[in-house]
Amino acid sequence: MVPASSPYPLVFRFDALTASGTLVLAAAVVAFAVMAAFGMPRAAFLLTWRSTLRQLRLPIVTIAFILSIASLMNYSGMTSSMALSLAATGVLFPFFSAFIGMLGVFLTGSDTSSNTLFGPLQATTARVSGLDPLLTAATNSSGGVMGKMISPQNLSVGAAGVGAVGREGEIFRRVAVHSLLLTALVGLVAMLQSYLLPWMIPGR
């Protein structure tokens, strides 16, 4: 049975002043002002800021595209269509929910981006399947953490941090099995919480 269509609310929010990035920038400015009072060169702040922008230019663009794709998928109906297909997994969906989260982080490199991309899909599938959307959303995030270790973006950053540039493939081979096993464990825990231990879900 196909559920009746319903409008998807469109809300525009401009909360730049309360965004985490704005707060971090404000904290950096305050810290610089204190350090400058003790003799730190003023040019150091601009040099650090420019270096940080250069280092994060690609992640910033990637996150912007991910958010754009998520909005397009939600408002075009793609997310709902995928959710209806995934609902066919029935009682096994809580298990696969973890792997969806892992896949999202593998593709985007960010748990936040994965939640933005697949969060509505998880919630819609849960409602269609008669499950708790809170559980599937949490499972998406928990499974996403297990995808951090195999995400190409995180592998490149980690390899650069320990002087292992060029050995990303070797690192991936060593951690891939761990990622799959831990994701499966998260899926099993979600199954238990959904059917045997529902009291663990807030609000139940």
Image (cartoon, helix red, strand yellow):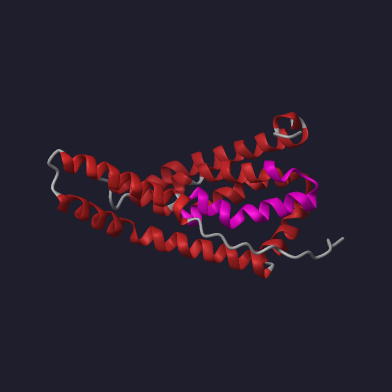
Q: Is residue 64 left or right of residue 93?
A: left
Q: Which residues are magenta?
A: 106-135
Q: Characterize the magenta stretch by its predominant secondary structure.
A: helix
Q: Quadrant of residue 184?
A: top right
Q: Is residue 196 left or right of residue 68?
A: right
* Residue 72: x %, y % from top left: 60, 68
Q: Is residue 48 left or right of residue 65?
A: left
Q: Nearer the viewer, residue 54 or 188?
A: 54
Whether residue 130 appears in magenta in the rendering, the answer is yes
Q: Nearer the viewer, residue 123 or 92?
A: 123
Numbered-mark total: 0
In the rendered image, the residue lying farthest to the bottom is 76
Task: State whether residue 168 appears in this view.
Answer: no
Q: Nearer the viewer, residue 172 or 120?
A: 120
Task: State whether residue 24 appears in this view.
Answer: yes
Q: Nearer the viewer, residue 163 or 83?
A: 83
| Residue at 15% over, 53% down | 43
* Residue 41: x %, y % from top left: 13, 48
* Residue 160: x %, y % from top left: 28, 48
Q: Quadrant of the N terminus?
A: bottom right
For residue 173, above or below residue 75 = above
| Residue at 40% over, 54% down | 153
| Residue at 50% over, 46% down | 147
| Residue at 41% over, 51% down | 21
Q: Quadrant of residue 118?
A: bottom right
Whether residue 1 appears in magenta in the rendering, the answer is no
For residue 144, above or below residue 59 = above
